[in-house]
Amino acid sequence: MKINRTFTQRLGFSLLTLVALFTVIPILGVIIYIIAQGAPAVSWEFLSGFPHDGMRQGGILPAIVGTFYLTLGTAFFSVPLGIAAAIYLAEYAKENWLTRLIRIAIINLAGIPSVVYGLFGLGLFVIFLKFGTSLLAASLTLSIMTLPVIISASEEALRAVPQAFRTVSISLGGTRWQTIRRIVLPQALPGILTGVILGLERAAGETAPILFTGAAFFLPRLPHSPFDATMALPYHLFVISTQVSEMPFKIQYGTALVLIVFVLSMNLIATFIRSRARAKRQW
Amino acid sequence: MAENKIVIQHLSLQYFDGTESLRDISMSIVANAITVLFGPAGGGKSTLLRCLNRLNDLTEMKTLAGRILLDGENILDPQTDVIALRRRVGMVFARPVVLPLTIRGNLTYGLELADEKRKSRLDEAVERSLRQSALWDEVKARLDDPAIALSGGQQQRLCLARVLALQPDVILLDEPTSGLDPLSTGKVEASLQELKKDYTVVLVPHSVQQAARTSDYAAFFLQGELVEYAPGTEIFTNPKNKRTEDYVEGRFG
């Protein structure tokens, strides 16, 4: 009996370890495969040049710059709005029907398929507000999509700051806002930043929300104003993978590699901020 | 003749969740003395303490009636400037909570909230408050270290110093030594005896022994009621009320 039980336990552990390992395989597989296929395409010319010959030659600079601008634009709208909403929810709001409604809205916002955001952005920003297919409209659409992530992460970070700090600050004659600005926000900042970066990272990699709102099939120049349309890495990848015939394989994978490096390096920054903050935390 | 710093008149309070409450409390707290509020848990001592600087505002209340006069002014009045009140009536909590700042930052925090920017004033407040709480010699060389690096006893004395830096009129202490070793407790109690020369001190002690050791006046609270209020020398040697006597002699607790 005893041997049997030990054997069952070993078998169980081995199986669980194996299953856990399986989660690593896809991400490693994707990265290794894309590096292997895409690395030969990446050169200075690829990163700094414009595409030509029906995008079959040259570089992807407009797409890189476009994705960079889109990320910045999204941050410009979603970060202040998201943090402000989180401060309201975590620090000021009482539990009542209004806050419950806001929370339900946030949860549902996070569950909407990204292509629906794209359609909504087309209706509201592009057509109704007459922003046209533009950086501005695409950034606003991505902002709406990113908001729930930023709000939830920021609210969680704010709530993690011990209540006792607030009581002490108020007992020393602090107002609620002084307490938030001087104690709570600085302590929550690493958590907020992590959430912000993860939200923006998702926005940077999205195709559907910008599809109808700001992404251009091909543009031989960089966007000059928020009202210009722009190329973007994820959409460019979609285009050259499905819409252009006789597309060299390595350009597709080179583009994918650049996109994945862009997104993963944001991820890395977030991880770095988080681990540094954990080491420094005083509570 | 001792001057009444705080006069509490028919104070009744009930929290929304039905926890600890106060029933028709009337008492006067004398200036430049240590007044001890003691009794078993849930008696209303902490609640009363938190009313004295309106920290009870942070908890939802079902009923609040009566008046608390501080130097003759009713601080429960909705018109009261609670920010100014909390600067005049400082509070030290049971668990030492140092803010995530430096030692100096903890001490200057209250003054900076009040827009004090002059470095000379801030430096003066740091040194004075640390001397008053008997911490100066231990920390003067490392004022810019994180406050969290201090020991538990030092942290609690820093919390006391942080209140003193604001030069309040009244100091409230809610079981300030409950987590401290006897040596640190002794230091805090010694500080209190010094402080009452300049301040009005209201203390919720963590034991009857501490109540007896430190009090000039003592009030015995039981289930939201003020049972007996008398000079400490009387209440601990010759209590008038049977319930006070039973508690003081350790028949219940």
Image: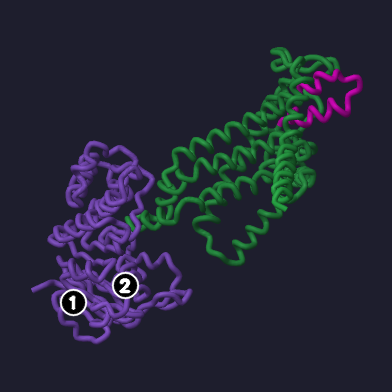
Chain colours: A green, B purple
Splitting the image into 4 quarters, where does residue A262 fall?
top right
Residue that appears at 44% across and 50% down: A180
Residue that appears at 62% across and 32% down: A266
Please state which of the two labelled residues, at mark 1 or mark 2, is closer to the viewer: 1
Instruction: Give the extent of the magenta segment.
Output: A228-255
User: Outermost residue, left direction?
Assistant: B1
Image position, residue A269 (x, y; %):
58, 32
* In this picture, residue B222 sits left or right of residue A269: left
Mark 2 chain: B
Which is nearer the eye, A212 or B61?
B61
Q: Residues within 10 Å of mark 2 (few under 14, many from 20)?
A: many
Residue where numbered disc 2 is placed = B45
Image position, residue B225 (x, y; %):
32, 81
> What kind of element bears circle 2?
helix
Q: Could you tell me if residue A132 is visible in this image?
A: no
- Mark positioned earlier in the residue sequence (1 or 2): 2
Q: Name the amino acid, label 2.
A: Lys
Q: In the drawing, what numbered circle is on residue B148?
A: none
Image position, residue B250 (x, y; %):
27, 77
Residue that appears at 64% across and 46% down: A149
Residue where numbered disc 1 is placed = B236
Image position, residue A231 (x, y; %):
75, 27
B145 shown above or below A220: below
